[in-house]
Structure formats: structure tokens, C-alpha cells
Image (tube, rainbow, N blue to C red):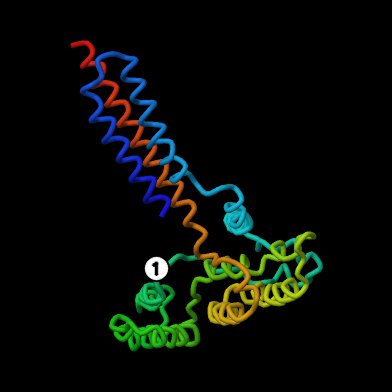
Amino acid sequence: MKQVLGIILLVCGLIAFIRFLPECHDAPTFFGGLIGVGLVTFVPAYFCLRPKSSDNGKKWDNVKRDKTMNQEQEEPIFEEISHADTHTATAPRPISGDYPSLKAELLEKCNPQSFMSPYDHRKIEIANAIYPSIIKCDDAEKLREFRQIAIRDLGVRFATQKMYDKLCAYCDLRKYSDKNNYDAHKVELANGFLQDIRNNADNIVVLEDIYEKIKKTPLWSSQVSVDQAPADDNGDIMLLLLVALFMVAIVIICVLVASTINK
């Protein structure tokens, strides 16, 4: 709502200033009008469109930091939590891949041509049997059944990185272990889930099951959804575009005023 109000104020300010231009016969009048219109419209518009305060931004500090750490290093982001874990060296790692939907991933990974090199007669037969049905299917539950067939009979490994990152963000112990707001119950829950998440980092079926379990615990209800975090970045981009548009408009107006004064 504040962004809409900011855009309205910005547009009104530009219109008001353009209508004021014919009355500008000298520089003082021009700059006086610019300051007046700016104080009434442009300044309030700025405060409406500027990024959220740092206090609100702090909500996503841990989430963004976790995602950045996952991108910059191959080891899981919670490596420091389990220094004593003797299975760290052999723990499975998330499977990379970004697909718009499960159907899109099935269509790519279950195509019979995927089993031509090396050639596998049996897998090509199985893929050929299910692929036409995958093409026509839009039912989520049926697509998950096809995924089970692909995992069991075709040995297909489905992308887990996105779900893995989301689950790790929900179970980040730093959110619940701050000395000023310590929650032993949530730490216990998160720690339990973390072990299962790490041990099944390459198993999308298990990770989705863990996700459903987390939704039924205080870890889910006590925080804002991780899925909404990128909205702040989109707002920053929108504000930068509006500021750039405003600066271009001011330059054009100044050129027009200068040519009018010269005449």
C-alpha cells in the first residue's frame, strides 16, 4: 500500500511541476518551484518507496546468510554444529538443480534418451512406458507417483538443493539460541530435524516429509515463511528503477527550462 501511495505522489509531483513550467521565467522561480513541489510530493514519495527499515530487514539476515554460505561452499551450512559427527565425511550432499515444477523435472530426467549413454535397454523400456503419461499428467499426486517409479526403477536423482536450503533455514539454531530470547524446546526440535535433514540431503521424498512435519511444529508458526524473503530484493530493484526514472525526468525538465529562459 505504501508503494502505491509513493508512486501516486511521484506522478502527481511530476505533473504539478510540468504544469508549473510555463510560469518559470527565471532561475529563482524555477528552483523555488522545484523545492516546493519536492517537499510536498517527492520527499513523501521517497519515504513511501524506500526499502524497509533495518529492523525489518534483520528478519532475513540469517536466511540470506545461510543461502549465501550454501552457494559459496560445498559443505552444508551447519557444518559447525556437528564437529563431533563422525559421519560428516560420508554424509550425502544436496542435489543441485532448479526446475519450475516437478513435471518439468520428470520430463527432463525420464526421457528415454537419457538412458542411451550408457545404453540401458531395461531403463529405456520403463521410461518409454511412463513418459507419454507424464506429458499428459497435471495431477500433483500422480506426478509424485511417477517420481517414485523414476527413483526406484530408473535410478533418477531429483534436485534437493532448494528444499534442503529451506529446511536448514527453518531449523537454524541461531534463531532460537540467542541469550536474550532462548527457547530450549525449539532448539531441541530444530536440532532433531537437522540431523534428519543432513542424513537425507539427497532424498527429496524424505525432505518433503520433514517439511510437512515442521509445518506442524512451533518452528513453523513462530516465524515468517522463508518463501517470502526475496520480496525485499524485488522492492529494492523497483525503488532504484523509480529513482532512475525520476532523475531522467528532472534532467529533461531542466533542459526544457533552460531553453525557455534563453528564449
Residue at horizontal 36%, vertical 87%? Answer: 125
Locate residue 94 relative to residue 262 in the image: left or right: right
Residue 92 in the image, given as x and y percentages of width and height: 64, 72
Residue at horizontal 26%, vertical 21%? Answer: 255
Residue 136 in the image, given as x and y percentages of width and height: 28, 83
Along the line of sight, which residue is nearer the eye, 256 or 156? 256
Give above or below for 234 relative to 225: above
The C terminus is located in which quarter? Answer: top left
Along the line of sight, which residue is nearer the eye, 211 or 74? 211
Residue at horizontal 39%, vertical 78%? Answer: 110
Give above or below for 80 relative to 200: above
Residue 62 quadrant: bottom right
Give above or below for 79 relative to 55: below
Residue 201 in the image, given as x and y percentages of width and height: 61, 73
| Residue 126 in sight here | yes
Residue 123 quadrant: bottom left
Residue at horizontal 60%, vertical 70%? Answer: 167
Task: Find disc 1 in the rendering and name its residue.
Answer: 100
Residue 223 quadrant: bottom right
Along the line of sight, which residue is nearer the eye, 60 or 37? 37
* Disc 1: CA contacts within 10 A as few (<14), some (14-19) or many (>=20): few
| Residue 73 in sight here | no
